[in-house]
């Protein structure tokens, strides 16, 4: 499949595709395919061998982990323009989290294993792709750090005022 | 271009004398947050205020605290305040019942720049209880919808059960003339909305940065990162407004209790155009 068929102008307008040359886009397009998922579809599963990544085109996806006693806990939601999965960047890796759709979703699925091979032969593409993923990862890390800060946590002095009203 | 936040009305002597109000309504918003509707005990009109201004509410005998008005400006008969019970005074206020008396002093402070924002895209970014001081802006813009371009509200709460004004938010989300996005830092199984910090929503929305007037209210760290995210999106810092918090006593700039660098938050703020406070914002010692 060539880029003209797979990658529409709307897709190419997404920030993920910014900065690539024509040849780069052709290689990317060779290794991607459109996918559609219904609601409640498990896109990836924690522990599964990681060979793909996804560029979300539509819908909403929950990134989850399973916590004993609490079930599946959602850590983050992804929407149009977001990237799902970067474990494929390291050889023999497995996904660290699961992902499931909450709304019907569509995405571009990229064959990470094939792309890694292409990157060896096309260092420019490899460099651009790694830069793109570095950005994705640093954004995620920044957001996660803020989440960990628990900005709206009640002070130790607080608690349910409804108990006070009942007194 | 927006030059200044709204102008603070002059604090007169009467601002130092509290007026008696009576609790007309008490609504539990969440486990630790409630909304009081107060009417003047003597009848007649309540204190008039501009969005972003606050009153000093007395929680007898614990003391008084600054609380922003969270209701619409056109409700002349009542004052509406949304309060998170965090300490002695707010916990005293949390025990008020319908018919109880409260002393109110105000309104104080520099309001949000609603007049300067006319003709612009309005972006409200709220974190936690920070939605309460921004709600009057939302009411105002919706009432005068044609005076403004797009209206976007991004609201971050700790968990789904900490979301304020739930029913109202559902109505706002159903409207086509504003975009209201909610995200929570921690979700539970019942939640199908966004999970992640509020700055993440900011990275995702469409923005005409040069035509955007951004008003931000929440914990200081949240405002700091929101400001950075706005800058990254190209919004000029002169079009960012933040609401600052410090403990207060007099509310009129005479006791020095609320000093932040060269400013008294009660008189020079709480709403500041970002460049005015850039040098003191997020300074650890302040
Ligand atoms: C201009 C202005 C407007 C304000 N508007 C509102 C409002 O609309 N609604 C509202 O609920 N509060 C508002 N506040 C905050 C409120 O005035 C303070 O929470 C107040 O200090 C509470 O007094 P207290 O005696 O109950 O608790 P304090 O003894 O003052 O505080 C108890 C503990 O809670 C912490 N704390 C105080 N405020 C918060 C908070 N918001 N979140 C987390 N921890 C906190 C303190 O650091 C302390 O550890 C506003 C403050 C300012 C300056
Ligand atoms: S509260 Fe007294 S100077 Fe601000």
Image (spheres, rainbow, N blue to C red):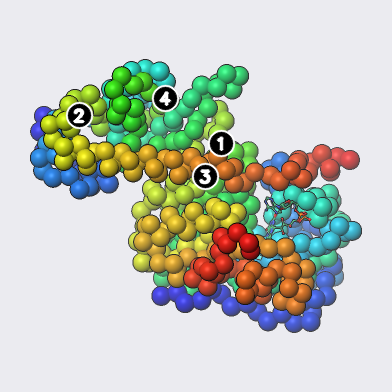
Q: Is residue B214 left or right of residue B162?
A: left
Q: Quadrant of residue A79?
A: top left
Residue in the picture at 60% in, 59% down: B284
- Looking at the picture, how far across and down is residue B134, in whole percent? 58, 60
Residue hosting label 1: B186
- Assign the C terminus of chain B to one quadrant of the image: bottom right
Of marks 1 and 4, the one in the foreground: 4
- Residues flagged by tags 2 and 3 on a common chain: yes
Query: On the image, which quarter does residue B212 sit in?
Result: bottom left
Q: Quadrant of residue A158?
A: top right
- Identify the chain of the residue marked 4, using the numbered disc in the image: A
Q: Where is mark 3, residue-wise?
A: A146
Does residue B276 lie above or below B244 as drawn?
Answer: below
Specify the subunit that label 1 lies on. B
The yes-or-no answer for disc 4 within 8 Å of ligand 1 is no
Q: Which mark is residue A115?
A: 2
**Which residue does the numbered mark 4 point to in the structure image?**
A96
Q: CA distance from mark 1 to mark 4?
A: 19 Å
- In the displayed structure, A163 sits above or below A51; it is below
Q: Find the distance from the CA under tag 4 to the CA under tag 2.
A: 20 Å
The verdict on a common chain for dots 4 and 3 is yes
Chain assignment, label 2: A
Q: Quadrant of the N terminus of chain B?
A: bottom left
Q: Nearer the viewer, residue A40 or B66?
A: B66
Rendered residue at 59%/78% (across/down): B7
Q: Residue at x 61, y 19 (%)?
A: A69
Mark 3 Cα shell of 10 Å, populated few (<14), some (14-19), many (≥20): some
**Pointers 4 and 3 in contact (CB under 8 A)?**
no
What residue lies at 69% left-to-right and 66% top-to-bottom? B54
The reply, left or right, for residue A67 in relation to residue A6 is: right
The mark nearer the N terminus, 4 or 3, is 4
């Amino acid at each position: 499949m060539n880029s003209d068929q797979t990658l529409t102008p709307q897709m190419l307008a997404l920030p993920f595709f910014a900065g690539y040359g024509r040849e780069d886009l052709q290689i990317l397009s060779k290794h991607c395919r459109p996918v559609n998922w219904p609601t409640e579809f498990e896109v990836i599963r924690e522990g599964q061998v990681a060979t793909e990544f996804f560029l979300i085109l539509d819908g909403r996806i929950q990134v989850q982990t399973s916590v004993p006693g609490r079930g599946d806990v959602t850590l983050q939601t992804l929407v149009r323009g977001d990237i799902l999965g970067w474990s494929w960047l390291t050889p023999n890796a497995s996904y660290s989290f699961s992902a499931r759709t909450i709304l019907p979703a569509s995405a571009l699925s990229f064959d990470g294993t094939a792309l890694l091979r292409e990157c060896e032969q096309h260092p420019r593409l490899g460099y651009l792709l790694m830069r793109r993923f570095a950005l994705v990862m640093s954004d995620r890390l920044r957001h996660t750090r803020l989440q960990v800060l628990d900005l709206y946590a009640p002070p130790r002095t607080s608690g349910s005022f409804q108990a006070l009203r009942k007194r | 271009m927006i030059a200044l936040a709204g102008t603070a009305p002059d604090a007169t002597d009467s601002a130092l004398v509290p007026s008696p109000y009576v609790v007309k309504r008490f609504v539990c918003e969440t486990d630790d947050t409630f909304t009081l509707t107060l009417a003047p005990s003597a009848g007649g009109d309540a204190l008039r205020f501009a969005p972003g201004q606050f009153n000093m509410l007395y929680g007898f005998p614990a003391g008084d605290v600054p609380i922003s008005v969270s209701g619409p400006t056109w409700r002349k008969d009542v004052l509406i305040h949304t309060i998170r019970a965090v300490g002695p005074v707010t916990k005293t206020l949390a025990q008020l019942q319908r018919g109880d008396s409260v002393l109110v002093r105000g309104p104080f402070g520099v309001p949000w720049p609603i007049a300067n924002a006319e003709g612009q895209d309005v972006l409200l970014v709220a974190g936690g209880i920070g939605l309460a001081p921004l709600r009057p802006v939302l009411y105002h813009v919706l009432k005068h919808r044609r005076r403004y371009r797009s209206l976007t509200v991004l609201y971050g709460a700790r968990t789904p059960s900490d979301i304020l004004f739930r029913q109202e938010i559902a109505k706002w989300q159903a409207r086509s003339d504003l975009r209201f996005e909610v995200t929570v830092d921690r979700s539970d199984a019942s939640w199908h909305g966004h999970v992640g910090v509020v700055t993440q929503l900011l990275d995702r929305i469409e923005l005409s940065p040069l035509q955007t007037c951004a008003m931000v209210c929440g914990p200081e760290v949240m405002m700091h990162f929101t400001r950075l995210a706005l800058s990254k999106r190209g919004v000029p810092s002169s079009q960012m407004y933040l609401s600052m918090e410090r403990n207060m006593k007099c509310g009129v700039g005479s006791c020095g209790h609320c000093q932040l660098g060269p400013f008294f938050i009660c008189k020079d703020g709480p709403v500041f155009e970002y460049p005015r406070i850039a040098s003191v914002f997020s300074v650890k010692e302040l």
